[in-house]
Each structure stands twice: as C-alpha cells, then as structure tokens.
Amino acid sequence: MARKVIRRYLPDPAAFKEKPALQFLGDLLHDPNLFHLNRHSVSLAFFFGVFFAFLPLPGQMVLAALCALWVRCNMPITLALVWITNPLTYAPVFFATYQLGRWILDAPPLERTSEHNWAWLLEEFSLIWKPLMLGSILTGLVLGGASYIAMQLFWRWHVVRAWEQRKRTRQNREQ
C-alpha cells in the first residue's frame, strides 16, 4: 500500500508530539487524525503543505500546523512540505512568484539601485507586495492543487497495483 511507502519517511507520532516547537498546540496534538495515513488525509496534507510553502509570510510552519489541525489532515507531511521554500530556495521561488504577479498585474519592473538600507527596503516592499502576494497565492493554489491530484492518483495507482498483484498470486496458487 501507499501507506507503507509514506510511513518509511515519517517520524514516529510519539516523537513528533514531543517537538518543542509544537508544544504551543498542547493537547490538540493528541488527535489521532493528525497522524492517519489515508488517501484523504495525505492528499490534503500535500495541498496545504505546498500552498503554505509558497506564501512569503513569517510563521509559515505555525500557519500550516493550525490549518492541519483545522482540516484534520496529516500534520507531519504538511509541515515537511512547507520546507519546499527553505533558506536555499526561497529567493528564486519568491522572485519567480513576484514575476508572475508582476506579469498578471502588468506592473513595471523595479529600477536597480546600489543603495540597500532599511528605508530602501521599506520603500521597495511597498511596491512589490501586491505582485508578490498575488503570484505566491496563485502559485500555491495551482501547485497545491496539482500535488493534491498527484497524491490522489498515486494512491489510487498503488491500490490498483496491489489488487492486481493479489489477483495474480491467487491465480498462480489455483493453477
């Protein structure tokens, strides 16, 4: 089953519940639905994990954890997928989402300058936040939806393959 494939890569639920960064959730972490490995729970975890990965907000992990609690999907998978955007990938990812938002809004490109200080940063942020958020939300929705569908198809393919193997094994025994 697909469950066995995924379980190999996930942490033990007991160890996961003891993570200091998740202690703010308290007893909410004891809901067994947060650790179920079924098609619905894993597919939703992929959607929300990928969606929150593409949001350029501080606290992506907290937002993803709260969302996993709210929709009761697999929390370890949701939180792991948020790390698609990590310190090595966030610059190119958010530059691409900014460019997408800029293209959709038909906004002019930013002028290059050699001056980089807090005043410059605040001024530039006021110009880029709309295209960045639009591009990030759209990218998160599209890639999150694609990952949801991909996980649904993967799970279905895995189940059908297991059925076929059982059928072949049964036929070989009967012969």
Image (cartoon, rainbow, N blue to C red):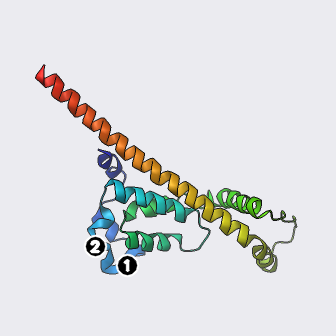
Q: Which residue is mark 2?
A: 30
Residue 15 in view, yes or no: no
Locate residue 41: give its quadrant: bottom left
Drawn side of residue 121 relative to residue 27, left or right: right
**Nearest the eye: 6 or 73:** 73
Which residue in the rendered view is the most extreme toward the top?
Answer: 175
Assess disc 1: are there few (<14), some (14-19) or many (≥20) residues with their C-alpha within 10 Å of its C-alpha: some
Q: Which residue is rendered at x = 30% and y = 49% of the image?
A: 3
Q: Nearer the viewer, residue 155 or 18?
A: 155
Q: Quadrant of the C terminus?
A: top left
Q: Is residue 46 left or right of residue 163?
A: right
- Coordinates of residue 11 in the picture (x, y in percent): 34, 59
Residue 4 visible in the displayed image: yes
- Three-letter amino acid code of the residue under disc 1: Leu
Number of numbered tags placed on the structure image? 2
**Label 2 element class:** helix
Per the image, the residue denoted by label 1 is 25
Q: Position of residue 149 (x, y in %)?
A: 46, 50
Q: CB atoms at circles 1 and 2 under 8 Å apart?
A: no
| Mark 2 burial class by Cα count in 10 Å: few <14, some 14-19, many 20+ | few
- Which quadrant would residue 107 be assigned to in this image? bottom right
